Image: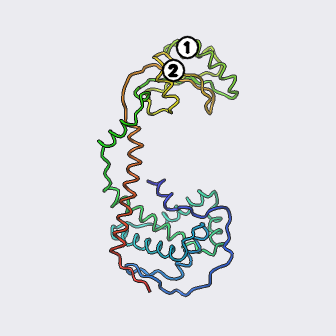
Amino acid sequence: MANGFWGRATGAVIMGAVLTIAAAMPALAQNVRVTVNGTPITDMQVAQRVKLFALEGNNGGQKGATDQLIDEAIQMTEAKRLGITVSNAQVDDAFLQIARNLNVSQERLAQMLQQGGINMDTLKDRLRAAIAWNGVTEAAIMPQVQISDLDLDQQAAGQLQAYQNFDYILKEIIFVGQGSSNRTGQANRYKASFAGCDTAVDLSLGFTDAAVIDVGRRHATQMPEAIAKELAGLNVGGITKPRVVENGVSMLAVCEKTQAQDLTFIKGDLRAEAGNEALSGRVSSYMEQLRKNAKIIYN
């Protein structure tokens, strides 16, 4: 949930390098524009949010800024009702995470905001509301999301390909080091002499920088498509063609091979996709209902 949250919480926060707002907006009195469940939203807050929008390249303007502040006030009210609190440390951590995502220091991020005429609290207030709403989502909305295992089984079975119907015990033979052409030549000589997993280690002793690694049991759905397809065409005692990898040249040897459907990994992807879609719908409905029930007074 954390990774998804940061994507939603920060959105497109502070795009590009150093952006400067050309002209500061005129100073406004602290007039209350809207009251949400007793919480005032002032002209100054709206003006500051508009500036933050401008720094982000968001063209929402005053209406978009006002709507966002209203939503955040509603979210904070609901978090309070559920006993969810957000500490200053959590907000500071979120601010630090934004700086890291932008590859700048916290001080530089603060300077970027200042150059745009934006008080740091404007961004921190939005982060606080986002963290609180994440807490509401986890506590009150996620438990409502139910994914049918039967439906997932049926979908996963429909996606399973013929080459993915195998379970393997594998060894990896890797020729470590730079110089892929030389390593590939050694790997091809090893492959030509390969006589099965039982002698894999002994055979490697006759080659420079060759290592044999017990990969263990793997199902075809755990492997990249190209490798799964190649392994499906091999019998026990077979070995794949050499492939250049990050630290050398690698081959996989088939020590055992059995036919076995395993929908675990396909179901995992389907569950995440279905769960995200269902959660998104629930969150929207929940927020829509909160907005309907909120006491919003425009001045």
Residue 6 in picture, x, y percent from top left: 50, 58
**Mark 1 and 2 residues: CB-CB less than 8 Å, in contact?**
yes
> Mark number for residue 253?
2
- In the rendered structure, the answer to whether residue 8 lies left or right of residue 270 reads right
Residue 227 in picture, x, y percent from top left: 52, 28
Name the residue at 50% across, 76% down.
63
- Residue 290 against residue 158 in the figure, above or below: below
Choose top left, top right, bottom left or bottom right for residue 266: top left
As helix, strand or loop, the secondary structure at mark 2 comes to: strand
Name the residue at 62% across, 65% down.
109
Amino acid type for the residue under numbered disc 2: Ala
Name the residue at 40% across, 79% down.
36
Residue 88 versus residue 250: which sits nearer the camera? Answer: 250
Alpha carbon of mark 1 to alpha carbon of mark 2: how far?
Answer: 9 Å
Q: How is the image coloured?
A: rainbow
Amino acid type for the residue under numbered disc 1: Phe
- Residue 186 against residue 275 in the figure, above or below: above
Residue 42 in picture, x, y percent from top left: 49, 82
Residue 185 versus residue 247: which sits nearer the camera? Answer: 185
Residue 275 in picture, x, y percent from top left: 38, 51
As helix, strand or loop, the secondary structure at mark 1 comes to: loop
Count how many numbered circles sit on residues in the image. Answer: 2
Q: Which residue is mark 1?
A: 194
> Mark number for residue 46?
none
Which quadrant holds the C terminus?
bottom left
Q: Earlier in the sequence, mark 1 or mark 2?
A: 1
* Neighbour tally class for label 1: few under 14, some 14-19, many 20 plus, Cα within 10 Å: some
- In the rendered structure, the answer to whether residue 42 lies left or right of residue 146 reads right
- Residue 1 against residue 175 in the figure, above or below: below
* Neighbour tally class for label 2: few under 14, some 14-19, many 20 plus, Cα within 10 Å: many
